[in-house]
Image (cartoon, rainbow, N blue to C red):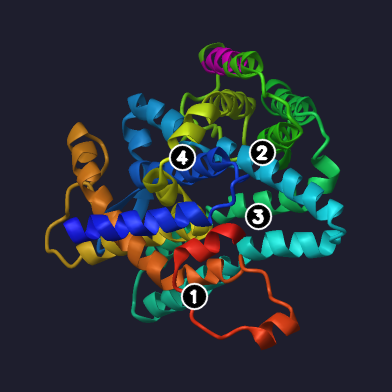
Amino acid sequence: MVEFRTRWSTLAAGIDAATPADRDRAVDALRAFAILGVVLGHWLVTALTARDGGLSTTSPLAHMPWLAPVSWVFQTLSVFFLVGGHVAARGYASAHERGLSYGAWAGQRLGRLFRPVAAVLVLWAVVAVGMLIGGAEFATVRSLVKLVLSPLWFLLVFAALTAATPLVARLSPLWPLAVVAAVDVWRFGLAGPEWIGWVNVAAGWLVPFTLGAAWSRGAFARRDRALLLLGAGVLATAALVLWGGYPASMVGVPGAAVSNLNPPTLAAAAFGLAQCGLAFLVRDPLARAMRRPTAWAKVALVNLSAMTVFLWHQTAMMAVTALGLLVPADLPGLHTVPDSVGWIAARLLWLPVFAAALSLCWAAFRIHEQATGRPKPSRTARTAAVPRPRTDPAEEINHA
């Protein structure tokens, strides 16, 4: 244990030393917390129940509605889009000043997003075909593949907004917020078609993305503006849930008539405003905490593999669940119906197991993400350089 702590301290010190002095570590901390919030949220509110030798998807929120506040803590996508808008706007402005073309900038930004996706799709295509050939029920295979693919909608929207940064960076968040409100009025108040709600997939996440872009220009530096954003978001969300007929859960619930997330509703947008206001308020405490090398090293390592963690966390949970089927009896918190406090207690005990499985996925597939973060050296530099393997995570910090 002493040796492990010594090695960790050495690694943390190296990462800290390799980090540029002007890097805003609070931004990385917010991104890491947002990703981990999504991961933990999925592990807590998604359940695979064993039935007739197969697996079906359900949620404890469907059986225990009083757990809705859990979604308020772990539905952190607005913070991720906030940070994404901030980083994209700053990155594009910097690239423009350096004379880098839009195509080159977009290729660098989007390459890191999509390269890890290929590994997930290839592996699950093989797994799905193998399961069907092996006699698995189609419904089981469909449930598993849906869990893997469903988070990719978020990545597609994020990539689209990132690509549109030159067009939306100066857009006021009030405009997409107004679109979300208008769509909800048409959809719910005027009995409009259901498909119109999908307009909010772009408009809803454009709200925090444009807030992030405004942040990159110096907006929300004052604490009173952040407090106003937080207070307005909380009050609007409460009013919409209590009197507007919106569900209390900020994630989708199987069987529910309305989902706040698929597609995003005005309640989800208002809740996102509150989250963004809170994020602005905790920037300074986070920046102070990130001055400690060990704290910063953890955040930096998560950021280096953020997409890998996001893309493989459902696979890790499903792998543990599938291996558990080898046990003759249904395992509490893993295969049983999530309809009791006992299930919650058992589920919490499974989280470290899911994390261990995710660490194996991370070790196997992180190279697909990190390989895109390192700029290609010039031909002269390649000729003059002495080839050596890159094994130190500290070397990646400058390119994260």
Residue drawn at the location 20% of the way across and 32% of the way down: 341
Q: Residues within 10 Å of mark 4 (few under 14, many from 20)?
A: few
Secondary element at tag 4 = loop
Q: Are marks 4 and 2 in contact (CB under 8 Å)?
A: no
Q: Is residue 388 left or right of residue 101?
A: left
Q: CA gap, disc 1 to disc 2? A: 37 Å
Q: Earlier in the sequence, mark 4 or mark 2?
A: 2
Foreground mark, 4 or 2, reads: 4
Q: Earlier in the sequence, mark 3 or mark 4?
A: 3
Q: CA distance from mark 2 to mark 3?
A: 12 Å
Q: Is residue 221 magenta?
A: no
The residue that mark 3 highlights is 156
Residue under circle 1? 390
Q: Secondary structure at mark 1?
A: loop
- Give the residue at the far left of this rendering: 328
Q: The residue tagged with tag 2: helix, strand or loop? A: helix
Q: Find numbered disc 3 in the image and state the secondary structure of the residue it sits on.
A: helix
Q: Say left or right for 296 vs 225.
A: left
| Pointer 1 or 3: first along the chain | 3
